[in-house]
Amino acid sequence: MEKRESGRLMLESEIPAFVDAVIEAGCDICAIGHDAYVLGDLEEMDAAADKFDRINEVFGDRDFLLPKIVAYLRSLGRYLEPGPSPGHWSDNKKAH
């Protein structure tokens, strides 16, 4: 999936709305460790390709917010630690 630049920079205050939009698009967004996040698996992302075009238009460039997005996802408990067979983020206890 190609990310289209809208020329707009996403605001830090828009992170919760961005995460909600990705979830509503049908993708299981989660942080991986403390340095990355994934929007979902390939099937989810393919099915939501048109919705992602709209999400990219609405929110714009967010690459510079990577650490903040990861921190927000971790605060929701939507994270996996790298390693063998990490399971699913929903296996986490509570958000911290």
Image (tube, rainbow, N blue to C red):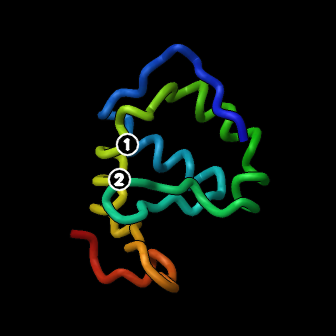
Q: Which mark is residue 13?
A: none
28 vs 13, left or right, is right
Could you tell me if the residues under marks 1 and 2 are in contact, i.e. CB atoms within 8 Å?
Answer: yes
Instruction: Label 2: state its secondary structure.
Output: helix
14 vs 43, left or right, is left
| Residue ID at (71%, 60%) | 42
Residue 70 in the image, given as x and y percentages of width and height = 35, 53
Residue that protrudes farthest toward the front in the picture: 83
The quarter holding residue 15 reads top left
Residue 11 in the image, given as x and y percentages of width and height = 35, 27
Q: Please say if 82 is above or below 87.
A: above
Q: Could you tell me which quadrant the C terminus lies in?
A: bottom left
Instruction: Label 1: state its secondary structure.
Output: helix
Residue 75 in the image, given as x and y percentages of width and height = 27, 61
68 vs 41, left or right, is left
Label 1 neighbourhood size at 10 Å, few (<14), some (14-19), many (20+)? some
| Residue ID at (52%, 58%) | 29
| Residue ID at (77%, 52%) | 46
Q: Please say if 42 is above or below 7.
A: below
Q: Amino acid at mark 1?
A: Leu
The quarter holding residue 54 reads top right
Q: Please say if 17 is above or below 96.
A: above
Q: Amino acid at mark 2?
A: Val
Residue at mark 2: 70
Residue at mark 1: 66
Cα–Cα span, label 1 and label 2: 6 Å
Q: How many marks?
A: 2
Label 2 neighbourhood size at 10 Å, few (<14), some (14-19), many (20+)? many
| Residue ID at (56%, 54%) | 39
Q: Could you tell me which quadrant the N terminus lies in?
A: top right
The quarter holding residue 28 reads bottom right
Residue 87 in the image, given as x and y percentages of width and height = 50, 84
